[in-house]
Structure formats: C-alpha cells, structure tokens
Image (tube, rainbow, N blue to C red):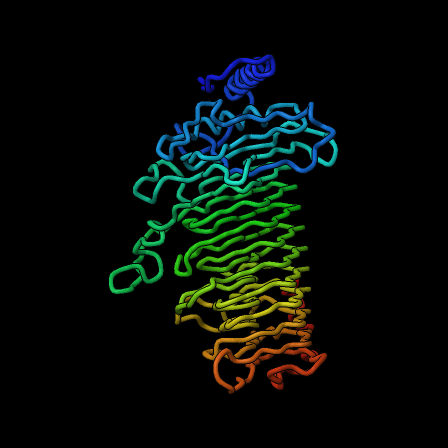
Amino acid sequence: MFRMKHSPISPLAFSTFFLTLFLLVQARHHSHTKHKHSHSHKSSKHSNPAPPTPPHNENNNNSSVVLDIRTFGAIGDGKTDDTESFKMAWDAACQSESAVNAILVPQGFSFLIQSTIFTGPCQSFMVLKFTDGLFWLKYVDKVDGTLMPPDGPEYWPKNNSRHQWLVFYRINGMSLEGSGLIDGRGEKWWDLPCKPHKGPNGTTLPGPCDSPIAIRFFMSSNLTVHGLRIKNSPQFHFRFDGCKNVHIESIYITAPKLSPNTDGIHIENTNEVKIYNSVISNGDDCVSIGSGCNDVDIKNITCGPGHGISCYLYNLYSIGSLGNHNSRACVSKIVVRDSLIKMTDNGVRIKTWQGGSGSVSGVTFNNIHMVSVRNPIIIDQFYCLTKDCTNKTSAVSVSNIIYTNIRGTYDIRSPPMRFACSDSVPCTNLTLSEIELLPAEGDIVHDPFCWNAYGDLETLTIPPVSCLLEGTPQSVSDFDITRC
C-alpha cells in the first residue's frame, strides 16, 4: 500500500490524495497486464536515479503529475529495500497520459535500490518543447535525496546482474536531473583480488571480476542528464549504448584516483552527444568514446584531482580502445574544446588495437589547457594489455585529426606528444597549430615521438615536431578498405 503523512486536510490536499490513489491503482493494474519490466531478480523493484526541476513549463501546469516516491511505500532509511516502490512509481508515471510526469525523490532520505531495468517506451506526451514520452526523475531543493545500491559484492543478491545497477531501456524522451546524490558504494568492488594490483602482494588474480555500471542508458533517445552528483561507482558511472541525442550538462562525478575502471562517461554506438560544463575526477577515463560514435561535442570539462598522483591514473578524453579482437571500429566527427586537464596520465588520446579495421576520422581537439599531464597528446595504435602482443598487418585507420591551441605543462616521464601509428596503416592528415607544452619540472624540453605519422604543422610548436612526415604515404589507397 502507500503511506501519507498526517496533516490538516484542505480541499487541495484532499484532491491530491485521490489523484495519487487513482494513479497508483492504475499503475498496479497496468503492471499486471500490459507493461512488463525486465529486471534481474524476482523481488527486486525498478530503481531509478533521480534528478530535479523540469525545463520551463509555465504554460503546462495542468498537464503535470508529480509522484512522491514515499507515496508508493518507499521508506528512505538507507536500509530498507525500496526497489518495488520505485518500480510502481515508474509504471504509474510511464503509463500516465499527462504531458509531464515526475517522480519526486525528496531531500533528507536515502533510498536503497537493487539492480533494476526501467523499460519503455512510455506514453506519448506532446506539449511545448517536450519530446514524446518525456519523463523526469526529479530532485528538489538545494540538497536532495540519495540513491544507492547494496553495499558491495557480499550484499549484492546472487540472482541479480553484476554488470549494471540502474538501466533505462528503450526510452524516448527522459530528463535525469537534480542536485541530489547517487552513491555507487564501489569501495568493496574495487578491492576484489581480480582488480589490478588488488591481489596478494600487489598481484592481479584471475577469475570472474564483474562489477556493476552505475547508470546505463540502452537503445534510448532524446536524453538529458543535468545537475547530478554521482560518486564511487563500482565501474563506469554513466554508459550510453545505442543511444541518440544525448545532452549531459553540469554534472559532478568523483571517485578516488586509484579506483579501477571507474570511467566517468562512456559512450558506444551513440550519436549526437553533447557533454558540457562538468567536473569529472575518477580512476579511469573521464570521457571514453567507443566504436560507432558520431557527432560528439565535448566542451568546458574539468578533469583531474587537485592533489598528487601515483602510477595509476586516468585520462580526460580517450577515443578507444578500438578494433579489439580484430573487430571493425568507426568513430567520426568528435570535437573536444575549451577544457582543463590536470594531473592525469593522458590528455587527449586515441588508442586502437592491432588487427582491427575501420577508422577514426574528423576529430578536433581545440583550446585545451594541460597541467602536469604525463601524455598530453597521444595516438597509440599498438594498444595492448599484455606483454606478448604481436604485430598485425591490419589496423584501424586514423586520419584528419586536428590539434589546435593546446598549452600547458607535462610530466617529464614521457614525451609531450606521441604519435605511434601502425606499420601497415599510417596515421594521415594530422594537423598541429599553436601547441605549447613545457615540462612541469626543470628546463629540458623533451622531443616528441613519431612513428609512421603523416601531417602538417600550421604554426611553430613547442617543442618542435620535426618527426612528423609530410604529405600522404604512397600506399594510402591500399588500406582504404579499412575505412568506414
């Protein structure tokens, strides 16, 4: 059943009570007849991270429904399993024909939720600027509610998927926003002996090592993530697979620099992506771009901790790892601009596996400031996780890459620029201008490294890049078959 706080009954409150009751009854009826959600264990309830205020809806006040999660029985004490309440609230909102439906996760509560898939499509809502099936998970006030999963592998139900926590599947039109906190509680996952250097005496032990992604959007479109704080995911914080029209803005992601595989935002087979005005500090890539991505704009991102680093760090923007297991990888129209990278292992990087096929093309890195970055600019077509990788004759083609106005300091353990391109498939049309990278310590400027890299210098660079080959290789037509 549902719970309500006792308060003096006004006509408005009385009407609101019966409206909520009607929606709940409809949701329960619907969940047994039409709308089925897939989730990882029978008793788990669909959980949802939360966000706040809907975008300007002044002219649509009569078409909005706000559902307080507590109305559906959620306790919010951080111990009680509130999954079922979230699933019922999702069903009620998803099947409502109101123009705007909001699930309210109120401030001052911590809601424990099991691994859950929230499934669409939801009902069409056509009002003002809103897309079909617009759905808001909503936080309110300055400090909002908290969502969190079970505390580590020991408490993760055996029947639940260990690959993901909260999944949104086949949603067309959703805004996930608010100033609330999503706490991934990843500490115990990071310490599994199968994680890098977490075994006895700093070893990495073999065996199953699945850890859940905090929030995953799959085969969805017209998505907005705005204003959220998310920390300490067991693995990736956000992952977008097979999505279109994604807008991420003003989010804050944090995890310790030694937390393994805690990428901030990972996108794969996803197009029309905007990532703006956010701060990401974690133990792996801040933004990682996988195969099948096109039309990605990343602007005004701050990546990196404000303190010392050790040998296991993360990089800001990594395109890769592409072509793994001889696969075909295609990435194009990527722009990274107006951003700060500090104390990271890599700055702007393209990494590919040997033996793959496809292409990375039309990538621009513009106006980026580096602070003590070990590898500020890097292309690595020999990416390998072991020491026994052999050279392959095929590779992902890397071409039409622009680096402009990249300045700052680099960690002197590595050269400031490294273009390590395939023996058989050279990098082509690399363009550099207004590059100024100085050592963070000392006065010795290290020379860049190039291997089979072709391109042009539009301006003088610091340090000078004398190793870049001019023009295009004569055999360029021989590997056009690798392109997308």
Q: In which quadrant of the rendered image does the N terminus lie? A: top left
Q: Is residue 359 visible?
A: no
Residue for point 49% across, 25% down: 88
Residue for point 64% across, 58% down: 299
Q: Position of residue 127 (x, y in %)?
A: 73, 30
Q: Is residue 408 visible?
A: yes
Seen in the picture, residue 333 relative to 13 is either above or below; the reply is below
Q: Position of residue 435 (x, y in %)?
A: 64, 77
Left or right relative to 390: residue 205 = left
Quick one: 431 or 229, which is closer to the camera? Answer: 229
Seen in the picture, residue 72 relative to 243 is either above or below; the reply is above
Quick one: 134 or 39, which is closer to the camera? Answer: 134
Seen in the picture, residue 150 relative to 347 is either above or below; the reply is above
Seen in the picture, residue 31 relative to 470 is either above or below; the reply is above
Extreme residue in the front direction: 8
Quick one: 203 or 111, which is closer to the camera? Answer: 111
Q: Position of residue 262 (x, y in %)?
A: 45, 54
